[in-house]
Image (tube, helix red, strand yellow):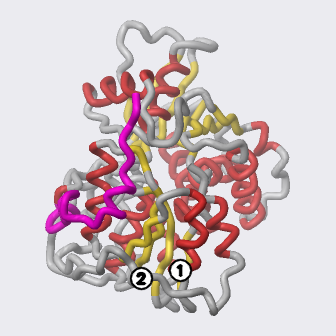
Amino acid sequence: MRLGALGIAAAHVTSNARRGQPLAKPRAKHASISLAASAQPAKTARIAAGSHSNPRGPGLALPTPVYPFRLGAAAEHAELWVKDDGAIHPLYGGNKARKLHAVLATLVAAPPRRILTFGAAGSHHVLATAVFAGVAGIPVQAVLLPEPHTEHVEATFRALIGQGIAIEPALSKARALPAFLRSYRRGDQVLGPGGAGLPATLAYVDAARELERQVKEGALPPPDEIVVALGTGTTAAGLLAGLASTRLTSRVIAVQVIGGSLSRATTLGLAWRAARSLGLRNTRGLAERLTVERGELGSGYGLPTPSSEGASRRGADAGLSLDPTYTAKAFAHALARTARGPAGRVVLYWHTLSTLPLAPLLAGSPRLAELEPRLRQLLRPIRR
């Protein structure tokens, strides 16, 4: 799935764009969900007294943990470590929380009347936007595209609907641009798919520096390779630019989960922009430190592969929860890299999925059968 047309449209919208009518009516926000964070990473999302606290305030539990993943007797070539962003915030974790925290901080001084964003039906980005913008009191509308129907995707889809956002379905890529134009209103803050942009990229620049501090403190050995899922490219780009500002020599191995040939160019463009904003003069080395791995994509976005299903089972056995769209494919490649190449390497898998239970966000969410047909059609059966 490619959402590039929406990004182009966002640059050309005018105040005459026609207002769309959402098919999912906004529900009351979950006033009981608090943005306040605990001192330690939470294992479950916390339900507490309501608060519209400042998104720049206490929230992210940093640094996120690192730990070795036990490969067993078969490990001969490399060590595998995990950098786990899964419980970075007590409401919703993963890389989306790290990035949304940075994005919303730029909007505090002059909050927009509404956020308009995009994603697939089970988009972690859209769910994170709904959660954190909702706490900040900013309404959200999302243009959603179809996604293969898995249990994880359905739960995420229902959870984001339960946050009370307005939804404009686009039942094919060809309908995405018209859906965007129907939805746009004067005064909207448009967030591209995945929240892609400079603030989100800089969030992972900071994450790379966080990793360097953990290496210096002896929490893990310096990684030779950092394996991360590649969607819009923001996370990989931030790590790439951030590493260039540290003494770490790690390469970024970005595992492509979305079809298309522009992933490398997009990622490098985001990284170069971030590096320039930091005053880094020599950006030529960024391209040499980035490898885009396309071998785990399989039949396409959101579709499991034999290797990703095997990786999910291995992760589950060790208590690491993976999703079929992003992290299972990235983790599958991380496992594969430990079984080949020069011996003695350190491979770091950067875990970007929220590991917090969705149950608190599903409270009061409609069941799938209760949704209007055009919303249910966003979940497409998987043909094996």
Q: Residue at x 62, y 14 (%)?
A: 341
Q: Is residue 34 above or below residue 299?
A: below
Q: Residues in magenta?
A: 360-384
- For residue 277, above or below residue 329: below
Q: With 194 as the anchor, is 378 left or right in this view?
A: left
Circles 2 and 1 in contact, beta carbons < 8 Å: yes
For badge 2, the amino acid type reads Gln
Q: Which quadrant of the figure contains the C terminus?
A: top left
Q: Percent from the top left, x then y, of residue 350?
A: 48, 41
Is 46 placed left or right of 58 in the picture?
Answer: left
Q: Is residue 371 visible?
A: yes
Identify the disc placed on residue 281: none
Against 180, residue 232 (above or below) is: above
Given residues 119 and 145, the one toward you in this image is 145
**Residue 220 versus residue 151: which sits nearer the camera?**
151
- Front residue (pair 132, 276): 132
Q: Which residue, given by chain and number where applicable, does mark 1 sit on?
A: 182
User: Would residue 279 be counted in the magenta stretch?
Assistant: no
